[in-house]
């Protein structure tokens, strides 16, 4: 693995722990030879992560939709910047060129992107691990929601194990190193009648 797609907020959030953890993640990525693939922005946790990796001589690849590029929000020290037509193209491209997906704290866009990455893994469109970096228990309510999906029969227990919630960088590395994609679900005629 070399490229890590990171989704995160275009603001820093209320807790200083979010920015602190983002800086730690950036330094950890460079130390472990991970290159950053992200949305290309210079604000919020996105900007903090890109700056940290750039400052530590790491590589930063931005993929930004044209509508945001025109607002002059792109980080100015990117290894490479690709301007794409729209958000859907950005999300697809980020998954195509990365080896894993990780979400730092963020808003609806962050949640949408990591949810799509995990959803696509279940249908065979994303073979890479998905991680929610659970700083200050930010994602704990979502973790309970995924557990509820299992309890209520909407997600298999095996597939649930393919989505990691953690605040431990060593656990993230171990999860990525040993990851195998979920088996693609097969449907029977019996399923169609339900």
Image (cartoon, helix red, strand yellow):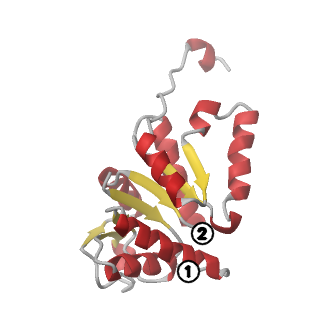
Q: Which mark is residue 107?
A: 2
Front-most of residues 59 and 61: 59
Q: Kindly identify the residue that appears in the image at 55 percent across and 80 percent down.
A: 11
Front-most of residues 131 and 84: 131
| Left or right for 44, reference 53 | right
Element at badge 1? loop
Q: Quadrant of residue 181?
A: top left
Of the two numbered discs 1 and 2 on the same chain, state the one appearing first in sequence: 1
**Where residue 128 sits in the image (x, y, percent)?**
41, 45
**Where residue 26 sits in the image (x, y, percent)?**
43, 72
Q: Kindly identify the residue that appears in the image at 74 percent across and 49 percent down.
A: 144
Tell me whether the residue at label 1 lies in contact with that at label 2, contact meaning CB atoms closer than 8 angstroms. yes
**Where residue 155 sits in the image (x, y, percent)?**
64, 34
Report whether residue 89 is seen.
Answer: no
Dot 1 corresponds to which residue? 11
Q: Quadrant of residue 61?
A: bottom left
Badge 2 crowding class, 10 Å Cα cut-off, few under 14, some 14 to 19, many 20 or more, is: some
Element at badge 2? loop
Front-most of residues 194 and 110: 110
């Amino acid at each position: 693995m070399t490229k890590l797609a990171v989704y995160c907020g275009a603001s820093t959030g209320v807790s200083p722990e979010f920015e602190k953890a983002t800086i730690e993640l950036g330094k950890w990525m460079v130390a472990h030879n991970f290159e950053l693939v992200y949305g290309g922005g210079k604000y919020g946790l996105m900007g903090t992560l890109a700056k940290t990796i750039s400052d530590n001589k790491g590589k930063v690849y931005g993929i930004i939709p044209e509508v945001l590029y025109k607002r002059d929000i792109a980080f100015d020290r990117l290894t490479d910047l690709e301007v794409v037509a729209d958000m859907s193209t950005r999300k697809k491209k980020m998954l195509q060129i990365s080896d894993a997906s990780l979400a730092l704290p963020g808003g609806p866009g962050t949640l949408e992107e990591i949810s799509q990455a995990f959803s696509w893994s279940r249908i065979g469109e994303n073979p890479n691990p998905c991680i929610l970096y659970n700083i200050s228990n930010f994602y704990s309510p979502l973790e309970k929601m995924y557990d509820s999906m299992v309890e209520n029969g909407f997600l298999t227990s095996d597939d649930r194990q393919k989505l990691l919630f953690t605040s431990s960088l060593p656990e993230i590395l171990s999860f990525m190193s040993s990851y195998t994609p979920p088996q693609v679900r097969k449907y029977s005629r019996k399923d169609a009648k339900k």
